[in-house]
Image (tube, helix red, strand yellow):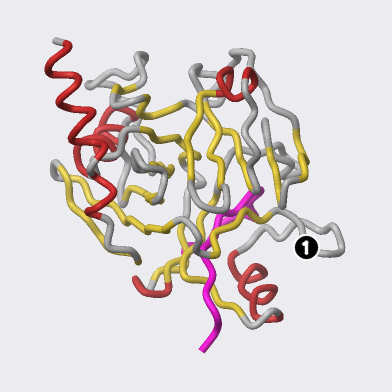
Amino acid sequence: MKVIRDSLLILLASAGAAFGGGCRDVVFEGESYAVCEAAAGEDLRLYLDDNAGARIGTFERLGRLLAEDGRAVVFAMNAGMYHPDRRPVGLYVEEGREVSRLVTSSGPGNFGLVPNGVFCIRDERFAVIESRSFAAEPPACRFATQSGPLLVIRGALHPRFLADSDSRYIRNGVGVSADGRHAAFVISAGPVNFHTFARFFRDGLGLPDALYFDGNISRLNAPALGRDDFGFPMGPIVALAAPAD
C-alpha cells in the first residue's frame, strides 16, 4: 500500500505542469465542470468590502470597482461560507490584515465537518492547509479564506465522504498543485455529492489538496466562457484580474 501511495504522490507532484491557464469546461466521469486556473504571481485576490466598508457582494459591483483601477475580471467566484450579514465564517485575511478569526472546533454543517481548511494566497505560491495545522504554524498569507470540509488531503479524500451519498448540490471549491504554483477553481455544472466532487480534483485534475467553498449558492463569473451567474449577494469573493483592454 505504501508503494501505491508513494506512486500517487509522485504523480500528483508533477500535475502542475499540466496547467494551461484560463477557464474551460471539463467532463469527468460523466459530470461537467467549469475550471478556471491561476498561476502564482498573477493578480488573484479575495474581496469582501469596498473602500467605504460596504459589502461588494456581486460580480457586477466587483467589475465596476476593478474598472476604476483599470482592471477587468478574468474570473470570479464565491470563496467561502458567510453569516446572514455576509461576514465570513472562520478565518478571513485581506492584504495581510485579519478580518475574521480562525475556527478550529468541529461543529454543525459543512464548515464544521473537520478536517476543514484554509486557502492561502502568498506572493509566489498558493496553499490549502488543514485548519489546526494552520493554527499551530500560521503562515504569512496575503489573502486567506477558511471553509470546509477539505476535499482532498495529501492525495486522500476526506474520510467522511461516501461514494453513494444522495446529498447532491451544485458545488464549488479550489485545488492547489503540489508545488503551490497553480490553483484551480472549480464549479460543477449540475448537482454532485462530495465524493464525486473531490474525485474530480484528485483524479481529474491531479491535485493533492483541495478545499470546498460552498454548495447551492455557488456561482461563477467567467467572461471567456460567456458565463455570469446571478443570485443573492455573496460574502467573500475570489477573483483573478488583468489590465483592462
In the drawing, does residue 149 fall left or right of residue 176? right
Q: Which residue is mark 1?
A: 50
Please name the residue shown 17% across and 45% down the image. Answer: 28
User: In the rendered view, would you say 53 is above or below 105?
Assistant: below
In the drawing, does residue 93 fall left or right of residue 79? right
Please name the residue shown 45% across and 35% down the image. Answer: 212
Which of the 4 image quadrants contains residue 57? Answer: bottom right
Q: Which residues are magenta?
A: 229-245
Q: Amino acid at mark 1?
A: Asp
Q: Nearer the viewer, residue 159 or 229?
A: 159
User: In the rendered view, would you say 228 is above or below 108?
Assistant: below
Helix, strand or loop status at disc 1:
loop
Residue 243 counted in the magenta span:
yes
Q: Quadrant of the N terminus?
A: top left
Residue 69 at x, y percent in the picture: 69, 79
Q: How many marks?
A: 1
Mark 1 Cα within 10 Å, few/some/many (few <14, many 20+)? few
User: In the rendered view, would you say 189 is above or below 193?
Assistant: below
Please name the residue shown 77% across and 45% down the image. Answer: 97
Seen as rendered, the residue at the extreme right is: 52
Please name the residue shown 47% across and 26% down the image. Answer: 149
In the drawing, does residue 102 fall left or right of residue 79? right
Seen as rendered, the residue at the extreme top is: 1
Which of the 4 image quadrants contains residue 160? Answer: top left
Residue 181 counted in the magenta span:
no
User: In the rendered view, would you say 174 is above or below 161?
Assistant: below
Residue 105 at x, y percent in the picture: 63, 13
Q: Nearer the viewer, residue 89 or 130?
A: 130
Residue 63 at x, y percent in the picture: 61, 73
Residue 23 at x, y percent in the picture: 34, 64
